[in-house]
Amino acid sequence: SAMGLTLQTKPLDLKSESASLIKQRELPIPTSNSSLFMSPRRRTHSEEGPAINDIRMLNLPDHLAEFRDKTKSMIRQQSTRLESLKIVFAFNEGIANALESFAVGLYARLDIDGYVGKSENKNNSNTLSSALREIEGPKTLNAWRCVIGSLQSYAKYADDLAKEIKRGNVELKIILVSAEKELKVFHDSEESRWKYLCDAAKGVTKAKVRQKQNLADLEKAKTRVSQAEGDGGPDQPVDETKVAASVNKSLGKMFAMMPGASDEAAGNKMTPSMNKAMGKMFSMMPGGGEDVMAKVLKPEQRLAIAKRNLDEAKAKELKATESFEVATSVNQQAIVTYETEAEAAQHKFKSDNSRAWNEMQNALECSVKAMASFRESHLMSLERLLGSLD
């Protein structure tokens, strides 16, 4: 052309490095042209989720799995939607930059050829416009001026479109940042609620295991008392203090004969730590050390030990029962809290998401309308050009 502007198209080499990089990116592709603008209510998701396995493992009500799966599904859908919108944002930004570069380049070329800017000086003979005025006739110059005017309009429309797309992208960026923060709060709150619920359920399981163990120990202690009473224990009440002192003295003597016994054991005085050590030693023997105690201790001494162990077992069982009741109460409260807060959070997230989604669509529609306006204006400019050439 006279201005030296040429546009060349080059087919994409599918074996080139740039083409392979495009293939490797694996960006999500909408299933249809309108899927990006599809209402969140129209998107389907799986009704089954893995939460039911955790729920049943923790002995929680099955309906809690629906809350968990629904919340996780909402998080996944919103994350996918935001990632898609980020791609749209980057695409719009690239289009705007390309349009802006095109407009600047076209203005620069027109400036160099003496049609706009500082170079628009009829006395400058080094420009294309001066050269054409010297060699072309009035009709050709008039037609050429119409072409130049159309190019000037095209550059202006391209620059205006770039500004409109960037303005829409600024609004879209603000909405995206806000939506990402809301999604993070929604996700973190759900994980915190879920962790509290799971910890409460695990606490019930542990408390129940301890209660069963202490209950079994209590039954064993009752059995030992019955056996001690049947082995010739005293029928009449005895002095518990004297019996306890006698038991401590007997156990102290036996403990003192063991290798490495302490000075306290040498004095035949059984401390609480020594009593505990003896209890562990007897428990490791076959039959709980009953045969050994039968040979070492008198019947009333064995009965006193059995009763003391029974009192300790009752205290432990009572404490374990109280702990189980507290853990059960905490678990019930955690279930109610999870149901209430999860339902309220889902409702709020839906409302916020609907508002943000409408704002995103408005921002994207502004860019689409700006592109349509650009095409319309360019066509009108070409029509005026053709009309002036007739």
Image (cartoon, rainbow, N blue to C red):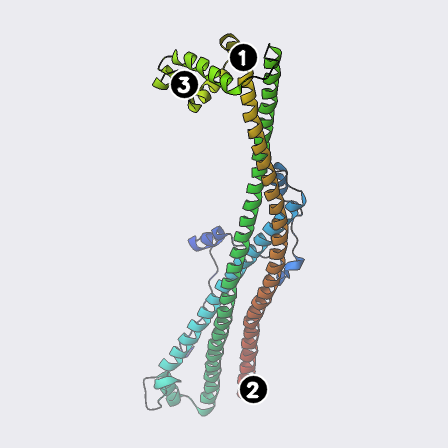
Q: Amino acid at mark 1?
A: Glu
Q: Amino acid at mark 3?
A: Lys
Q: Quadrant of residue 274?
A: top left
Q: Quadrant of residue 198?
A: top right
Count the marks: 3
Q: Amino acid at mark 2?
A: Gly
For the residue labelled by badge 3, is the local secondary structure a helix, a strand or a loop? loop
Q: Earlier in the sequence, mark 1 or mark 3?
A: 3
Q: Nearer the viewer, residue 266 or 49?
A: 266
Q: Quadrant of residue 104?
A: bottom left
Q: Position of residue 233 (x, y in %)?
A: 59, 12
- Determine crowd level at label 2: few under 14, some 14-19, many 20+ residues with C-alpha closer than 10 A: few
366 w.r.t. 127: above or below: above
For the residue labelled by badge 2, is the local secondary structure a helix, a strand or a loop? helix
The answer to whether residue 292 of the structure is visible from this angle is yes
- Determine crowd level at label 1: few under 14, some 14-19, many 20+ residues with C-alpha closer than 10 A: some
The image's mark for residue 269 is 3
User: Circle 1 is placed at which residue position?
Assistant: 290
The image's mark for residue 387 is 2
Q: Residue at x 63, y 50 (%)?
A: 339
229 w.r.t. 388: above or below: above
Q: Residue at x 60, y 34 (%)?
A: 321
Instruction: Give the Cα separation between the discs numbered 1 and 3.
Output: 22 Å
CB under 8 Å between callouts 2 and 3?
A: no
185 w.r.t. 379: above or below: above
- Determine crowd level at label 3: few under 14, some 14-19, many 20+ residues with C-alpha closer than 10 A: some
